Image: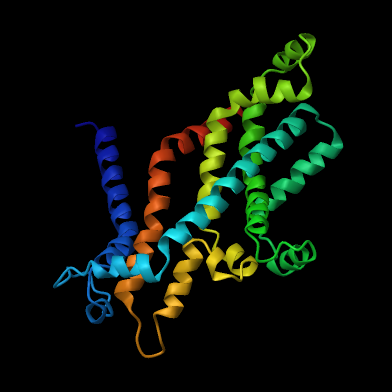
Amino acid sequence: MSRKKVFSSILQIVCWVFSLVVLVPFILILLNSLKPSAEAAFFSMSFPSEIKWDNYVNAFVKGHVLRGYYNSLVMSSVSAVLGVVFAALASFIIVRSTNLTNKLLYGYFFFGVVATGNMVTTTMIMSKLHLMNSITGAILLLATQGISFAMLLFTGFIKGIPRELDEAAVMDGAKAETLFFKIIFPLLKPVTVTGFMLNFLGAWNGFETQLYILTDSKKWGAILSMYGVYGEFSSPWSKDWGLISAYIVLTIIPVLIVYLIGQKYIIEGMTAGAVKG
């Protein structure tokens, strides 16, 4: 066996070991979600003495899982679509019109990737616009949070699309909206899917945004509802870790499914944007 194959085999083993380490917390939660409350309190990696499916039933009934799913799906899907569409439009203008103003705008949006948002000023602005405790307000805020990173993907990809395509469309009489949505936007499918997936996952896991914006528990998404379940079914002396673990598993499953489905597109879009840029 050549040294290259030996090195490759060792690298694969190391990667598998690290993967197993990452999976340990999930396995721990999964096992505890099937244990009675007293047994789950020890947080051991042992198999349950008896499988407690009631934890999942109670999580659905008492934890309002379906309501959390619905709210998260609405907020994540709509905000991801808005974020991707506006990011694509802005990126096209910035790439095609390389003046000082657009360069500064690109730097401004890039700064949005590396800098964290200030929720104090954000909530003040949302309050002035009467968007607090509103699904619409949460959607708009989540969409704006995803625009900056999506623009990095789109600008790198659009730079690889020849300008002659634009010129030919304009010469044929295409208007600006026709040029973008019927000619340019279909070519952006790889990064569009990538941006949608990443923005969807980010919005689904957007705990802090929902915590500050939504005060009505009926409007909470799955992640924030899990926080509510933790507070409702726990006390300073005891916590129903079996029920809480079951809710955590139910919250993770949709995100895991979306990621597994979109993993191929995420990788393709990231590499395509990098190569094109």
Q: Residue at x 22, y 72 (%)?
A: 35
Image x and y of residue 141, in percent: 67, 55
Q: Residue at x 67, y 46 (%)?
A: 148
User: Image check: 149 left or right of 108?
Assistant: left
Quarter of the rendering containing residue 252 = bottom left
Pick the front one: 41 or 106? 41
In this rendering, the answer to whether 179 lies above or below 37 is above
Quarter of the rendering containing residue 7 = top left
Pick the front one: 144 or 268? 144
User: Image check: 76 left or right of 10?
Assistant: right
> In this view, which residue lies farthest toward the left?
49
In this rendering, the answer to whether 208 lies above or below 146 is below
Image x and y of residue 181, in percent: 67, 25
Quadrant for the N terminus, please.
Answer: top left
Quadrant for the C terminus, please.
Answer: top right
Q: Residue at x 32, y 54 (%)?
A: 18
